[in-house]
Amino acid sequence: MISGTKIDWLTLSVMPSDDVDPYNFFLSLVDFFRLEEFLPLFKKGGGHGFYDYSYSYNNIVFSIPHFFESHSQGFCISFSGQGIDFYIEYMRKKDPEYSVKKILAKFLLLEVECDNLKCNISRIDLATDDITYSNKAGKALLDLDVITEAILKCEFTSPFAIKRKLKKFSVTFDNSQRAKLCGLEGDTIYLGSRRSNAYLRIYDKFVERTVNKIPIDENITHWVRFEMEFKDCNAMSVAEHMVSLSDDEFADWYSQVVNNYIRFIDVTENNISNYSRCPSKDWWADFVGTLSKTRLYHVKPVENAFDRSLRWQKKVVFPSVAALLRCITVQHYLMLVKEACLDSENAIRKQQEIETDFINADKHSPELRGLERYAQYIEDDEYRSFLLELRRARDDNVAAAVANAAKVRPSSPSYDFNYRC
């Protein structure tokens, strides 16, 4: 299996439900990531894309939208590979066990903690290095010349390839002019489209560092980087698996994902009609360490009927209800609601579904807006107290609902709407 994989780029996005003061929200994000002591060191810069401006420090960039677009565009936080290394090293001074898992888990839980935020992991790049040393045993597995020859001969299978003709493959070869000026050959192979949810790069990291005059261990004789770029739902899937699996389990899962996106094969006259049956090339089998494949999938936390109905009413119904209650009494309003519900069988069925989901919901279920799904990887005191408060609220309200269910017909449930979902 592929081991030693690291995150080489991470992009997070946070979208508030309403317009907010951009700078104050930026300060809140800095506080969330516990970077407040570095706030004076953040440098303000120009925006990129549709963002108004940005703040950056040590390869961590906060991109800030215009005021009137904060609720539609959101805020973007980007970490380069060096930015992630710096952040983890800094956080380990506070928590020696801190890791990338905790960054992802805490961020995924943020949307659960704050009902007015929508959080997304929009990009993750995973990099695996094939390195050999003059003073250590081991052989190079990824040779760019060999890989280029295999691609030119169509000796590979990939969903990136639409047809079995090279001109139809989404593949690009790039030999840096800067590398040539230094007397070096440093091809980069790109497979896929930058606009898609998955994109592959294979390049000579040794040449890249040499050209950019970055110090390299003098014992390194070969350094090729294999890098997969995942976006949107694919990035979410990678993050969820990284959080929920052990390091060995994730390495095995990622190996299968890579094998699904690209597999270099030995093509013979006997199997040329069916590439899926062709055996993997020995060097590729040694690199990925598996013959299995798996697809990326992102399972969104499911909200039950009560949770879904309450969120919708908060957003759409409650503003109108507030206006009505300024005109009529609460008793009059509730009487009208009850009369309307009793006139519709469909309304009664929906009421029963809402009540049943509320009473029978398992507070430890991962379907409760992903709460336990991510919270189990967070050990901060602030999150433990948050979970306890949430569970107490649910227990109290479930007990009240069960008691009311025994007295009141299912068509007219009674809830304590102080419940915090």
Image: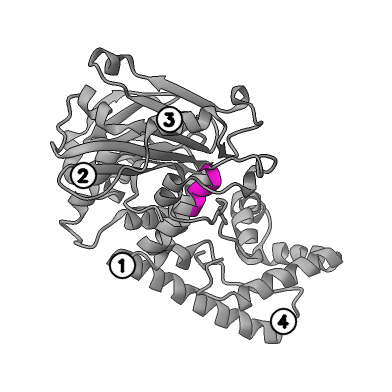
Q: Is 258 included in the stretch rendered in magenta?
A: yes
Q: Earlier in the sequence, mark 3 or mark 2?
A: 3
* Residue 109 visible somewhere in the drawing: no
Residue 4 pos. (x, y %): 31, 51
Q: Amino acid at mark 4?
A: Val
Residue 3 as seen in the image, left or right of residue 308: left
Task: Write down the residue under mark 4.
Answer: 408
Q: Position of residue 416 (x, y in %)?
A: 57, 71
Of callouts 1 and 3, the N-terminal one: 3
* SS class, disc 1: loop
The residue carrying pointer 4 sits among few (fewer than 14), some (14 to 19) or many (20 or more) residues within 10 Å by Cα, namely: few
* In contact (CB < 8 Å): disc 3 and disc 2: no
- Residue lying at 46% horizontally and 36% vertically, measured from the top left: 200
Residues at marks 4 and 2 touching, judged by CB atoms closer than 8 Å: no
> What is the x, y in percent for residue 47?
36, 24
- Please state the extent of the stretch shown in magenta in the rendering: 256-264
Residue 267 x, y percent position in the rendering: 58, 40
Q: Classify 10 Å Cα crowding around label 1: few (below 14), some (14-19), many (20 and above).
A: few
Disc 1 vs disc 3: which is toward the camera? Answer: 1
Report, in whole angstroms, how far the alpha carbon at label 1 lies from the one at label 2: 21 Å
The residue lying at 80 percent from left, 69 percent from top is: 348
The residue carrying mark 2 is 86
Q: Which residue is mark 1?
A: 379
Q: Nearer the viewer, residue 255 or 229?
A: 255
How far separated are the C-alphas under marks 4 and 2? Answer: 58 Å
Q: Give the label, 3 or 2, closer to the camera.
A: 2
